[in-house]
Amino acid sequence: MADHNALPLVVLAEKFASLPGIGMKTAQRLAYHVMSMDSDYVEEFAQALIDAKQKVHKCSVCCNLTERDVCPICDDDDRDHSLICVVESPKDVTAFERTREFGGVYHVLHGLLSPIDGITPDKLHIRELLARISAGGVEEVIMATNPTVEGDATAIYIANLLKPLGVKVSRLAFGLPVGGILEYADEVTLFKALENRNDM
Amino acid sequence: MADHNALPLVVLAEKFASLPGIGMKTAQRLAYHVMSMDSDYVEEFAQALIDAKQKVHKCSVCCNLTERDVCPICDDDDRDHSLICVVESPKDVTAFERTREFGGVYHVLHGLLSPIDGITPDKLHIRELLARISAGGVEEVIMATNPTVEGDATAIYIANLLKPLGVKVSRLAFGLPVGGILEYADEVTLFKALENRNDM
């Protein structure tokens, strides 16, 4: 915004524009919208930002984000603690929980290996995963990282670390998405679907 | 987000989702992103929200948003204060300022007439515009509201109020957008372009 705009609005628009997927034009629109909000609501919004940053931290067991010391999933005795699903981010935990089919627990890496971006194994929560398995009681670890170069590399790297510990390591199945159309499937997905075909 | 998510993140996502054009999925992504921000930056963001709401108000002359009593445009003696451009919102002032061609001043209505939505003339800053003109020194008022039903109705309503005050009232020209393709112009725009044709 040019200098004829009120400075606090310019500052706020810049903050919004620093969020992923929000350009300067949208950020300006959001800043103007804040002007039309109730004062109390704006203060709640500001407090919500600070609370999210200050009160939320990583679960001391699985590294998922939580405001408690141990997250509700790790703290749930009804879940199968011998089955750990390893995911890249907290968003993936949400995705699995939505299926309501997974009864095990999670481990959140908070990233994928990508040496070119400086993301080496020590930057991820791999040490914490090894500690959980060394503590015993874990039977299977499901590598549920994305089917991308980084996701596959991370899954293979961790699998190689875990196998000597005598734990079963599995990988999510790749194939045609349910409801998908064969004609539109990419070659790699179709190859995976062929390769991993099941008896009927 | 389900209840396994940290509550402060859910609260923050709800705040983001209350912004225009931001759905729950994007809001969750933004809330997660806040977690990865620097603590100081999050506090600046929170403060920017509060500042925008508390420090920014309407210019006592033109009703544009500013943190001063009189906005920099109204306060600029180099501008032509006898020429007032009437716009719907502060965003429109930004749009005109970007052209760097308008040397007059503005009047921001903060809305358009829309009786069906309860927006009657007393809800807009029309009284303030009449006061500026009554104070004298204004020669021309350009109605620069959008070429929509509400924009046209508002322009006509205000023009009818202003004409008895002996001030010239004009309307923005409507026609083909520069760089536009005739084939894709809608009928009304093409009709306006024909009707308002200029001698060459």
Image (tube, coloured by chain):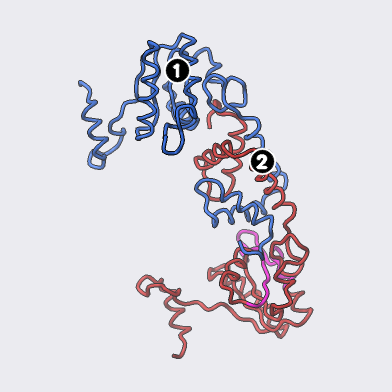
Chain colours: A blue, B red
Q: What amino acid is found at the position of numbered circle 2 in the picture? A: Asp
Q: Is residue B135 above or below residue A146?
A: below
Chain of the residue displaying label 1? A
Q: Quadrant of residue B12?
A: top right
Image quadrant where one finds the C terminus of chain A: top left
Q: Position of residue B50 (x, y in %)?
A: 71, 48
Q: Position of residue A198 (x, y in %)?
A: 22, 23
In this rendering, position of residue A93 left or right of residue A18:
left
| Marks 2/1: CA–CA distance | 37 Å
Asked if the stretch drawn in magenta spans residue B104, the answer is yes
Q: Nearer the viewer, residue A28 or B100?
A: B100
Q: Quadrant of residue B194?
A: bottom left
Q: Residue at x 25, y 31 (%)?
A: A192
In this rendering, position of residue B98 left or right of residue B120:
left
Report helix, strand or loop for mark 2: helix
Magenta part of the chain: B103-129
Q: Residue at x 56, y 43 (%)?
A: B17
Label 2 Cα crowd, 10 Å radius (few <14 / some 14-19 / many 20+): few
What residue would you read off at disc 2?
B40
Asked if the stretch drawn in magenta spans residue A59, the answer is no
Q: Residue at x 54, y 25 (%)?
A: B4
Q: Position of residue A79 (x, y in %)?
A: 48, 15
Q: Is residue A94 above or below residue A139?
A: below
Q: Is residue A143 above or below residue A47?
A: above
What residue would you read off at disc 1?
A104
